[in-house]
Image (cartoon, helix red, strand yellow):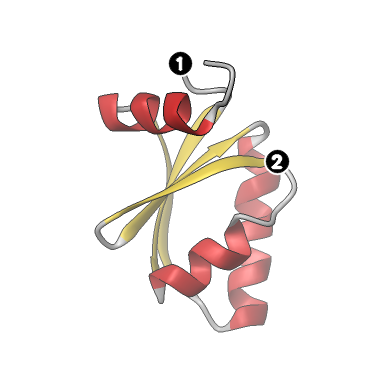
Amino acid sequence: MCKGKLLEVQCAPLMKASHHFGKLEGVVGITAYGTMLHLNVTDAERVRTGVLKTAAKEDITVTSIEPIAPSLEDVFATIVETPDA
């Protein structure tokens, strides 16, 4: 399964957000889904705070941040990204 918890972040511009949010402490994986990012995280509250601070600093619009259950695609993405899986 996924290594941690998942946060679904609706944001724009997506690629810029993916670049910056992927560098946050506690983010162990990131996947784009349409206009949203799924962040696999170890500490949801810490990452949520980091996302909001980074968004303000980097001129990224965040519409919502919600914890979600992993979908089959999230589980598959984690397995593909893990070399020893």
Q: Amino acid at mark 2?
A: Gly
Q: Are marks 1 and 2 in contact (CB under 8 Å)?
A: no
Find the residue positioned furthest to the bottom.
Answer: 59
Report the number of discs. 2
- Nearer-N-terminus badge (1/2): 1
Q: Amino acid at mark 1?
A: Met
Residue 71 in sight from this viewpoint: yes
Q: Secondary structure at mark 1?
A: loop
Relative to the observer, which residue lies in front, 65 or 16? 16
Quick one: quadrant of the N terminus? top left
- Mark 2 crowd level (few <14, some 14–19, many ≥20, 10 Å Cα): many
- The residue indicated by pointer 2 is 26
Image position, residue 52 (x, y; %): 60, 64
Find the residue positioned furthest to the front.
Answer: 83
Q: Secondary structure at mark 2?
A: loop
Left or right: 40 with respect to 13? right
Image position, residue 37 (x, y; %): 40, 53
Left or right: 57 with respect to 6? right
Q: Residue at left 50%, top 74%?
A: 16
Residue 69 in sight from this viewpoint: no
Residue mark closest to the camera, 1 vs 2: 1
- Residue 67 picture quarter: top left
- Residue 15 picture quarter: bottom left
Q: Residue at left 68%, top 67%?
A: 53
Q: Residue at left 62%, top 77%?
A: 56
| Separation of marks 1 and 2 at Cα, in angstroms | 17 Å
- The residue indicated by pointer 1 is 1
